[in-house]
Amino acid sequence: MVAEDVFVFLNESKAAANMAAWNDPAVEKLWLYNLHYFDDLNAIGSANRREQHTRLIERWIDENPPGSGNGWEPYPISLRIVNWIKWSLGGGALSSRAIASLAIQTRFLSERLEFHLLGNHLLANAKALIFSGAFFNKEEADKWLVKGLAILRRELPEQILADGGHFERSPMYHGIILEDFLDIENVAKAYGLGVFIRPEMLAKMRDWLATMCHPDGEISFFNDAAFGVAPRLTELNDYAERLKHPAQIKSSDGVVHLTESGYIRLQRKNAVLIVDAAPIGPSYLPGHAHADTLSFELSLHCQRVMVNSGTSCYGNGLERQRQRGTAAHNTLLIDGRDSSEVWDGFRVARRAHVQYLDIAETTDDDRVEASHDGYRRLKGRSQHRRSWLLDDESLVIEDQVTGAIDGAEIRLHLHPDIAVLEAGVSKVSLRLTDGRMVEVAFEGASMLVEHTTWHPYFGVSTPNICLVGALAGSWARTVINWGENG
């Protein structure tokens, strides 16, 4: 909320000063969802806007009759319930009308839980029931609490993998869910309800997120991911420590394999490499998946150099399709086709499976090799095999394609801050923001420089460069060298 009835969501500012604004068909649905979430009630500096928030809550009650419009869908209800209760516990004064509305919303939600969607939506439903169950002092509230806890106990073993990762394999959603769990622990402590989530699970979830973050402290972009949606790792760790969890040990050089999730982090001196050898996601819930198998992200000297393209929009449009596609990621594209058939905004048909994975860690270098079968559905029955060899001064990537193909290309998306200085047929010089130089050379592929876009936030498209290596045959080597500047 930036002014009375003026809001910025998805980096787009709009006025919402009348009843029609809550369900305006001309406005993107995700923007409208954010309007109904009431996140600003608990944002930084929100105490200075309490009078505005009070009026907004009363407006919502007046202009959103029960069961009508976007605000009465289960997911927005779930987030709004939690935000209103947090606001009240943090010093906001809910009127008797607002408290009655909270009870009505919880009652409505409890009969419309998103078992048809599962995943993070169902966890959000459970969290709202737990919050209302703790907040209200009545027999009905006990039933909400029991129902919420039953969902939580059922879903934790399914949704949180043994390595601590959320099973949808989105670092962004993982951060959201980690905050949800810390909130549940917080409200349980406030009301003396006991322990609902094991501290060991929360520790693994924090470690998982740290593994999937770059040295700048922000998440990597695998599957649906963008900055500014989930809290940052430092914020989540600060929250955990306020709840008396131990401080997190900082990551050090070496290899971390998130075995169940499928991601691998390699760190050596000035380089951090994060590799995707993960499944597309739960077989029954691939809605936030991208066709990014065997992609990677690379930071050098604490600067992002090679980045997957991120997520700026949801919905069913062409841009959503493009951002989910293989070409928007740092991997190999065969015959211009996606490695997994992403479609219709949140669906995946035939999908890539990692067939082979080998990890070797030595004193001098670290190596990952993997293959996937995502292209075997094509006429040539192709398979992609890739290896990464990281030492203190370089990264060598080898790509091998089996089967008949019409063409294949390696795609390397550069962070917008990386400058391209000299580009030849097979070699290019890059300059980092601190002035250090990096050389990228292709063997077995000719290079093109393509202008594209990077999407670090919802609603944001930032111009960047993609280095495209068109394979001459079925094999190519890419050498990324920063050694002379190290």
Image (cartoon, rainbow, N blue to C red):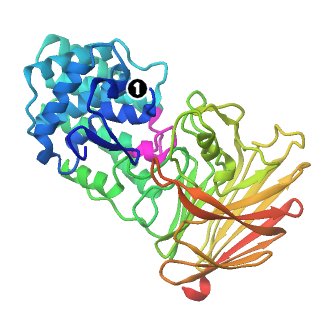
The spot of residue 205 in percent (x, y) is 39, 47
Quadrant in which residue 1 is drawn? top left
Residue shown at the point (15%, 25%) measured from the top left: 135
Q: Is residue 165 magenta?
A: yes
Quadrant in which the C terminus appears: bottom right
Q: Toward the viewer: 411 or 67? A: 67
Instruction: Please give left or right for residue 86 compared with residue 23 in the image.
Output: left
Q: Is residue 125 visible?
A: no
Residue shown at the point (53%, 77%) measured from the top left: 432
Residue 440 lies, with reference to residue 368, above or below; the image says: below
Type of the residue with mark 1: Leu
The spot of residue 133 in percent (x, y) is 20, 21
CA neighbours of label 1 inside 10 A, class few (<14), some (14 to 19), many (20+): many
Residue shown at the point (66%, 48%) measured from the top left: 293
Q: Is residue 388 magenta?
A: no
The spot of residue 387 in percent (x, y) is 71, 62
Q: Which residues are magenta?
A: 159-175
Residue 457 lies, with reference to residue 304, above or below; the image says: above
Q: Which residue is mark 1?
A: 122
Q: Toward the viewer: 420 or 341? A: 420
Q: Residue furthest right?
A: 404
